[in-house]
Image: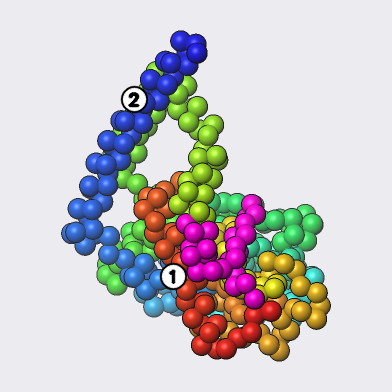
């Protein structure tokens, strides 16, 4: 072993010790805030924090609507237009449509139709927002909305793709075409906008409280809720000249590290759970499935696509006659989302969709595994109560 190896090893040990001490102090601070009720958040309590339509699109649409119940007229909308670098008079607020959430635009084809998450328009100009928290892109989705905007608003429209961290849409969503759209993020533009909205609503107590709670939720979803003093301490430790190279060595391992953490605290406990309940299981890079021995094709699938979700789908692709036909699809009460061809009994996102660095505590403490296990047991009980025959 070289002297350089021993120096880095000693530095790593010292860094990890300092970070651990800092983290423990931050944990104590958070626990004190919890005891004092400062972490009380209505959206967490009612289990809506990952609900794109029922919470995020609904609340954003209400804030953007000039005649909404917030009582500030067009101030929120104009602030948003400035955030996306658009003239604040781009939308005529006096003629803004009320139907701005989940607008149905026709039967879905490759070039048109579907449901737009949020649209703000005055008959001449429009802002069209596709809101993605964790849901996967649909084929030709942005392309269809672009065609709608081009047809309905020839005087001008803006197509917005909103995600947690400003991700680009998939080539499939774009229909492999090139056209103008703008990406924005919750962790940048939306948080900044909500801060402005809170100030604009300073004399509207109900609106301001809801906006602040929602802003705190967005910060939590985007891992922007760390205390500034805590961040400064971590920066001081990790950016110290003598520590930079050692921290670089840690960062080289981050993908392997989170994979091993998930393996130890999520996937292996799930295998043990399956065995203890006489069930079968399997895993690949993006999915884990668990199923009863008599189920030949379908199982309970935990899958990843911009967030973890669960439902009943095939683990072994069935032939045409063995697939669950649409007439046999059934909506299970234990799943929030409606059935679709690949998910014949429905599906839903997990409350914690980011099983990565921002939720290490909840993974290691067993919260994520318990959440999965509870959902599996709810599904099994639902299947039994409905007397479903899973092929």
| Span of residues in magenta | 269-294
At 31% across and 30% down in the image, what residue appears?
17
Which residue is disc 1 drawn over? Answer: 374
- Position of residue 85 relative to residue 132, above or below, is above
In magenta stretch: residue 276: yes
* Residue sitting nearer the eye, 250 or 136: 250
Residue 302 image offset from top left, x and y in percent? 57, 63
Label 1 crowd (10 A; few <14 / some 14-19 / many >=20)? few
Between circles 2 and 1, the one closer to the viewer is 1
- Position of residue 11 relative to residue 112, above or below, is above
Residue 324 image offset from top left, x and y in percent? 71, 81
In magenta stretch: residue 17: no
* Residue sitting nearer the eye, 268 or 36: 268
- One can see residue 61 in this view: no
Residue 148 image offset from top left, x and y in percent? 72, 71
Which residue is disc 2 drawn over? Answer: 14
């Amino acid at each position: 072993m070289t002297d350089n190896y021993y120096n880095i090893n000693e530095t790593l040990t010292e860094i990890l010790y300092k970070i651990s001490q800092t983290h423990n102090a931050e944990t104590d601070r958070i626990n004190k805030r919890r005891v004092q009720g400062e972490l009380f958040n209505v959206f967490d309590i009612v289990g809506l924090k990952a609900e794109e339509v029922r919470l995020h699109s609904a609340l954003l649409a209400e804030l953007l609507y000039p005649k909404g119940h917030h009582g500030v007229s067009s101030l929120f909308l104009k602030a948003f237009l400035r955030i996306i670098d658009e003239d604040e008079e781009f939308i005529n607020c006096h003629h803004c449509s009320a139907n701005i959430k989940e607008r149905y635009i026709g039967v879905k084809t490759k070039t048109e139709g579907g449901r737009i998450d949020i649209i703000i328009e005055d008959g001449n100009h429009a802002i069209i927002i596709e809101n993605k928290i964790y849901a996967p892109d649909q084929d030709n989705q942005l392309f269809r909305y672009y065609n709608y905007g081009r047809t309905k608003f020839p005087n001008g429209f803006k197509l917005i793709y909103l995600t947690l961290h400003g991700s680009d849409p998939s080539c499939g969503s774009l229909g492999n075409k090139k056209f103008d759209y703008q990406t924005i993020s919750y962790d940048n533009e939306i948080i900044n906008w909500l801060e402005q909205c809170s100030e604009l609503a300073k004399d509207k107590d109900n609106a301001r409280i809801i906006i602040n709670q929602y802003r705190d939720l967005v910060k939590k979803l985007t891992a922007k809720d760390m205390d500034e003093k805590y961040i400064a301490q971590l920066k001081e430790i990790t950016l110290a000249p003598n520590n930079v190279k050692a921290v670089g060595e840690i960062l080289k391992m981050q993908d392997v590290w989170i994979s091993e953490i998930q393996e130890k605290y999520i996937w292996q406990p799930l295998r043990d759970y399956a065995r203890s309940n006489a069930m079968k299981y399997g895993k690949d890079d993006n999915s884990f499935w668990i199923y009863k021995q008599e189920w030949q094709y379908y199982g309970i699938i935990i899958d990843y696509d911009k967030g973890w979700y669960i439902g009943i789908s095939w683990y072994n692709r069935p032939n045409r006659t063995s697939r669950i036909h649409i007439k046999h699809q059934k909506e299970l009460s234990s799943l929030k989302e409606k059935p679709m061809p690949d998910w014949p009994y429905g599906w839903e996102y997990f409350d914690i969709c980011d099983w990565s660095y921002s939720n290490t505590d909840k993974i290691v403490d067993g919260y994520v595994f318990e959440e999965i296990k509870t959902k599996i047991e709810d599904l099994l009980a639902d299947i039994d109560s409905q007397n479903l025959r899973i092929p």
